[in-house]
Image (cartoon, helix red, strand yellow):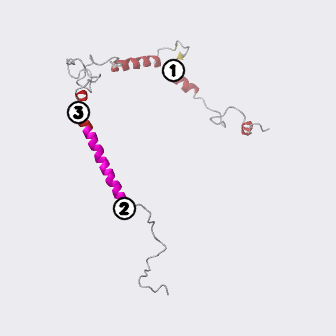
Amino acid sequence: MATNRDEYDLLRNPAVDYDRTDLSPQGILLFLAGLLVAGIFIELVLWGMFHFLARSPFFAKGNPSPMMQVQKAQPLSAEGKDFENTTNVNPGLFPQPRLQTKDVLDMSDLLASEHKILYAPQPFLDANGTVHLPIQDAMNIIVQKGLPVRPEGTAAGATGRPAASASKAPGAE
């Protein structure tokens, strides 16, 4: 019988095996070693480039940035007086346009103008023809009349057509 051999192993199935054409561990290790060598080479090239540029007369002490202050900053009369979060900023040297130099005053003016419109002593007509009511009067009118209510049985997107004609397909009669 063919099964009575000494080298026969019950746990080994000769029909089941792994694909021997896969990448070998040696190929993976060679790739990782090449990647390490390439990384070190790139690091050395970048270090040499920055080392060269730091000692170059054109880049080390070259042209100053156009954003750099040419004139000396004048000392503030009281440090941190003008800005609460930045103590050493002189607004006299701050570039133009200065968009909002008095933000607290601007906000107060905005709130005062809105308050004047909302709490006007009497209704008024603006240049566009809009009637402005005092806010308390407008709220009292809403309380007296109530909010507008959609009639029952109509959907939010209804166009006012009867429900029967809306259910028909276009062109069908």
Q: Considering the numbered disc 2 on the image, is that residue within a helix, a strand or a loop?
A: helix
Q: Residue furthest right?
A: 173
Q: Earlier in the sequence, mark 1 or mark 2?
A: 2
Residue 45 lies in magenta, yes or no?
yes
Q: Position of residue 47 (x, y in %)?
A: 25, 40
The magenta stretch spans residue 23: no
Q: Which residue is mark 2?
A: 25
Residue 54's label in the rendered image is 3
Callout 1: SS: helix
**Contact, CB < 8 Å: mark 3 with mark 2?**
no
**Residue drawn at point x = 30 percent, y = 44 percent:** 42
Q: Nearer the viewer, residue 136 or 106?
A: 106
- The quarter of the picture where the C terminus appears is top right
Q: Which residue is tagged 1?
A: 137
Crowding at dot 2, Cα within 10 Å, few <14 / some 14-19 / many 20+, comes out as few
CA distance separating discs 3 and 1? 73 Å
Eye-nearest disc, 1 or 2: 2
The three-letter code of the residue at mark 3 reads: Ala
Residue 94 point in image, percent of width and height = 29, 19
> Disc 1 to disc 2, how far (Cα)?
85 Å
Residue 97 higher or lower than 5, as above or below: above
Task: Say the numbered circle drawn on residue 82.
Answer: none
Image quadrant in which you'd find residue 57: top left
User: Which mark is first along the chain, 1 or 3?
Assistant: 3
Q: Which residues are magenta?
A: 24-48
Q: Three-letter amino acid code at disc 2? A: Pro
Q: Is residue 18 left or right of residue 55?
A: right
